[in-house]
Image: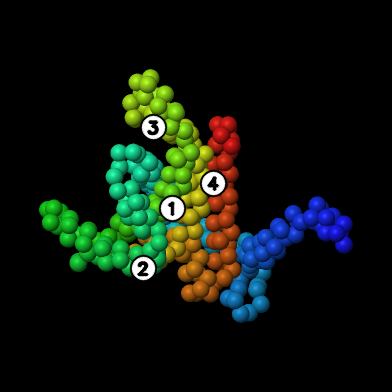
Amino acid sequence: MKKFVKTLKKYRAPYIFICPFFILFFIFQLVPVIFTGYISFTEWNGLKTPKWVGLNNYKIMFQDYMFKDAFWNNVFYWVWAVVGILFFALLIATCINSPHIKCKRTFQTITFLPYVCASVAMGLIFMMLFDENAGLINEFIVAMGGSRIPWLSSSKYAKIPVIILFIWRSIPWFTIIIYSGLLNISKEYYEAATVDGASPFQQFRLITIPLLKNILFFCALTITIDIWKMFNESYTLSGPGSSNTSLFQLVYEYGFKTFKLGYASSISVVLILVLLVISMVQYRMRRNDGEV
C-alpha cells in the first residue's frame, strides 16, 4: 500500500491536481466556444431546431450598419482605454511609490475605491452626472461660461461618458499591478542615477519605463481583452441608436432581445477572432523586441 501511494505521488499526483481545471475548461469554455462556432452558421431562436444557413449570417453582418458602428466604437474605446488607463495608472502608482507623498494609506484607499463599486450603479450615477438638463457636468460648464452639451442624446458625444467611466473604474486595478512592479525595482538604480546627475524625469524614462515594459505589456493586453468584452458601461449609458454600442452589447441585443442566436453567435466569433489577432500582434511586437 505504501509503495502504491509513493508511486501515485511520483507519477500521478501532478495530473490529479490539474485534471479538475481541464474538466472545467472543457465543459464551460471549450464546448461553448465550439457550439457558438456551429450556431453561427445556422438560423436559430433558441427553441426550434437550428437551420443551417452557411455563411449567410456573416454576409448579413458585414452589411449591418449596427455591427459597423459597434466595431468602430470598440476601436475608439480600445485606443483611448489603453492610453488613458496606462497613463493614469502609471502616474498614480509613481505617486504612491514616491517617498514625498504623505498619507499614503488614505491616498491608496481613495485610488482603489472605484474598483469595488458596482459598474451598473456607477453607470447610473454617471448618467445623472452627464444629464443634459440637470447634470453636474453641464452645470459646471455653464458656470464656466460654456453651453450645455447633449452628452447622451447626441451621437457625437455619446461615447465620451462611456470611455470615461470605463477608464475611471479600471485605473485602480492596473495601478496596483504597476505599483507592485515599482516595488520590485531596486533603489540602487535610482541612487546610482542620482549620483550621476540624472534628473527625476530622466530616471523615470531610462530606468522606470524600461524595467516596467513586461508589466505594461501585460496591462495593455488585459485592457484589450476587457474593452472588447465591455458591456455594463455602454448598456447603462446608452446613446441614440448604435452611437456608443459595444460589440458585446450588440451580441446581447441580437441574442436575448430579438432571439437571433445564430446571428449573435456569428458576431461572437468575429469578436473572438479580433481578440486573437490583436493579442497575437501585440505578442509578436514584444517578441521582436526580445522582451518575451
Q: Given the image, on which type of amino acid does mark 3 rest?
A: Phe
The residue shown at (26%, 62%) is 130
In front: mark 1 or mark 4? Answer: 1
The residue sitting at 53% across, 74% down in the picture is 259
The C terminus lies in which quarter of the figure? Answer: top right
Badge 4 or badge 2: first in the primary sequence:
2
Q: Residue furthest top?
A: 196
Residue at point 41% right, 48% down? 175
Evaluate if marks 1 and 4 touch, with contact meaning CB atoms under 8 Å apart.
Answer: no
Tag of residue 278:
4
**Residue 204 tag number:** 3
Q: Which one is in front in this view, the residue at disc 3 or the one at disc 2?
A: 3
Q: Earlier in the sequence, mark 4 or mark 3?
A: 3
Can see residue 208? yes
Against 230, residue 206 (above or below) is above
Q: Tell me which numbered mark, 1 or 4, is placed earlier along the sequence.
A: 1
Q: Which residue is mark 2?
A: 121
Residue at the limit of the structure toward the front, as seen here: 2
Across and down, in percent, residue 242 comes to 40, 63
Q: Earlier in the sequence, mark 3 or mark 1?
A: 1
Name the image quarter holding the N terminus. Answer: bottom right
Is label 4 in contact with label 3 (beta carbons under 8 Å)? Answer: no
Q: CA distance from mark 3 to mark 1?
A: 21 Å
Amino acid carrying label 1: it is Trp
